[in-house]
Image (cartoon, rainbow, N blue to C red):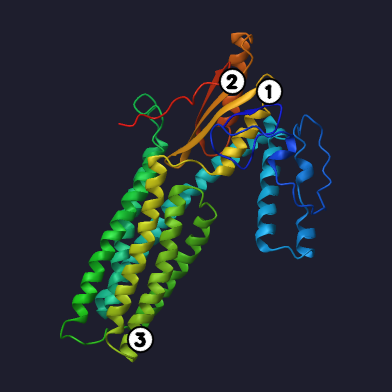
């Protein structure tokens, strides 16, 4: 992406070599006259491109009966503008507060991981007893799921601890990607288990044994207690879902709530309605597990392979660079991509050829520090150039 620092970058574009807007307000859609702009007064230092006047009053849109698509667009636009303007308001104290909050959240993630692992152990013990005593295929499916939760949970606990124990000489980029690897292994195990459960359920349907399972009141009470614990852990992990480990356990708890409730229902109905409902319930549960964890594996594989960051995040990087220092004349390239859960940023800026080396170094280094202070950014690489008419640099090797 190339743009002049004297005019606003296109905040809706993540493409490289983008054309420079002709005016500061060209970065936003101003073709529709909607009125009701937020009356924010910000000086030039805090709003160099005067984008605050483009914040739209959503209430006016609702009263004007605009479509949901239009309202949604301007909500996202407002959030983008406010996010960019917050850059100029952050002080060293607020930055420190944000870092302290991040450390507190990491402690909460640790509680979520170990708490979820403990709840999974308890659930497995209950499901094992219920499956053996009732001989229900649906409960057997939920018991196998609970067992795999323990195995996979152990993997996540190990990878989380390993990722926190950085060995900088051996792993200069850190070991945070181990958490993503752990989630991929977790997902693969769950998908494999689901395939086996489908095979077992089909075998049960085609057999001559048509006896329904024996589900007792004690089975029901114990499983309901376990589900209550699962529900509490689900809401706790949901608060921390931006972290890979907590998100993996959130998905696990959600699945267990659905699986165990449905498995218990199908097992009970097989004793009252028809014997084959238990096997059908087992197949449906296995398919649900297979689809859910296949999607989770796919998302994490994309992260570890290096998918590009969200376009809105690229827009924020462009805005930060273009407003960082008056000496930055152009933004040549903006690139951000995932390396596991975290993001690497590559930024090329253009300064006057006569700028002394020590000044260009200090500007580039301060911009690098600012980018690395963003949540989710592992590393930022800032390259200072003296012109932008050359072909895009640093293409990855094709083989």
Q: Which residue is mark 2?
A: 364
Q: Earlier in the sequence, mark 3 or mark 2?
A: 3
Using the rendered view, name the quadrant where residue 179 is placed.
top left
Q: Which residue is mark 1?
A: 325
Image spot of residue 42 (x, y percent): 81, 37
Image spot of residue 113 (x, y percent): 43, 51
* Secondary structure category for the residue under label 2: helix
Q: Could you tell me which residue is drawn at 36 percent across and 41 percent down?
A: 178
Q: Residues within 10 Å of mark 1 (few under 14, many from 20)?
A: some
Tell me the mark number nearer the camera, choosing from 3 and 1.
Answer: 1
Task: Measure how far apart labels 1 and 2 are at the Cα level.
Answer: 9 Å
Task: Tell me the tag on residue 269.
Answer: 3
Image spot of residue 3 (x, y percent): 63, 29
Task: Measure how far apart labels 3 and 1 are at the Cα level.
Answer: 69 Å
* Secondary structure category for the residue under label 1: loop
Q: Could you tell me which residue is drawn at 18 percent across and 81 percent down?
A: 206
Horizontal relation, residue 76 to residue 32: left or right: left
Horizontal relation, residue 316 to residue 264: left or right: right
Instruction: Decide which of 17, 397 is in the foreground and name it.
Output: 17
Q: Earlier in the sequence, mark 1 or mark 2?
A: 1
Q: Is residue 176 above or below residue 210?
A: above
Q: Is residue 129 above or below residue 216?
A: above
Using the rendered view, name the quadrant where residue 124 is placed.
bottom left
Q: Residues within 10 Å of mark 3 (few under 14, many from 20)?
A: some
> What quarter of the picture does the N terminus occupy?
top right
């Amino acid at each position: 992406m190339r743009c002049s620092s004297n005019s606003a970058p296109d905040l809706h574009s993540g493409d490289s070599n983008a054309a420079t807007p002709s005016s500061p307000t060209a970065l936003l859609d101003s073709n529709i006259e909607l009125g009701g702009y937020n009356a924010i007064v910000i000086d030039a230092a805090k709003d160099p491109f005067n984008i605050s006047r483009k914040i739209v009053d959503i209430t006016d849109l609702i009263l004007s009966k605009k479509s949901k698509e239009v309202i949604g667009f301007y909500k996202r636009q407002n959030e983008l503008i406010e996010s960019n303007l917050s850059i100029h308001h952050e002080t060293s104290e607020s930055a420190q507060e944000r870092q302290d909050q991040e450390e507190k959240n990491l402690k909460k993630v640790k509680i979520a991981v170990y708490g979820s692992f403990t709840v999974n152990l308890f659930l497995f013990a209950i499901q094992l007893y219920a499956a053996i005593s009732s001989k229900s295929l649906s409960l057997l499916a939920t018991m196998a799921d609970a067992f795999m939760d323990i195995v996979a949970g152990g993997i996540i606990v190990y990878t989380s601890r390993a990722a926190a124990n950085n060995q900088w000489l051996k792993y200069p980029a850190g070991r945070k990607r181990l958490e993503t690897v752990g989630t991929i292994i977790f997902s693969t195990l769950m998908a494999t288990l689901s395939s086996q459960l489908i095979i077992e359920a089909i075998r049960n349907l085609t057999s001559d044994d048509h006896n329904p399972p024996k589900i007792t009141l004690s089975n029901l009470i114990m499983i309901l207690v376990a589900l209550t614990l699962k529900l509490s852990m689900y809401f706790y992990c949901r608060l921390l879902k931006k972290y890979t480990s907590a998100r993996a356990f959130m998905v696990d708890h959600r699945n267990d709530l659905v699986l165990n409730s449905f498995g218990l229902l199908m097992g009970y109905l097989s004793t009252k309605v028809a014997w084959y409902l238990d096997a059908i319930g087992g197949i449906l549960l296995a398919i649900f597990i297979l689809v859910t964890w296949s999607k989770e594996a796919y998302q994490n594989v994309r992260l570890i392979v290096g998918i590009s960051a969200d376009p809105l995040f690229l827009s924020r990087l462009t805005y930060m660079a273009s407003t960082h220092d008056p000496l930055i004349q152009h933004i040549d390239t903006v690139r951000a991509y995932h390396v596991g859960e975290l993001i690497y940023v590559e930024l090329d800026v253009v300064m006057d050829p006569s700028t002394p080396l020590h000044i260009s170094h200090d500007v580039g280094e301060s911009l690098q520090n600012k980018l690395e202070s963003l949540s989710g950014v592992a590393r930022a690489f800032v390259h200072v150039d003296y012109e932008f008419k050359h072909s895009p640099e640093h293409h990855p090797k094709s083989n």
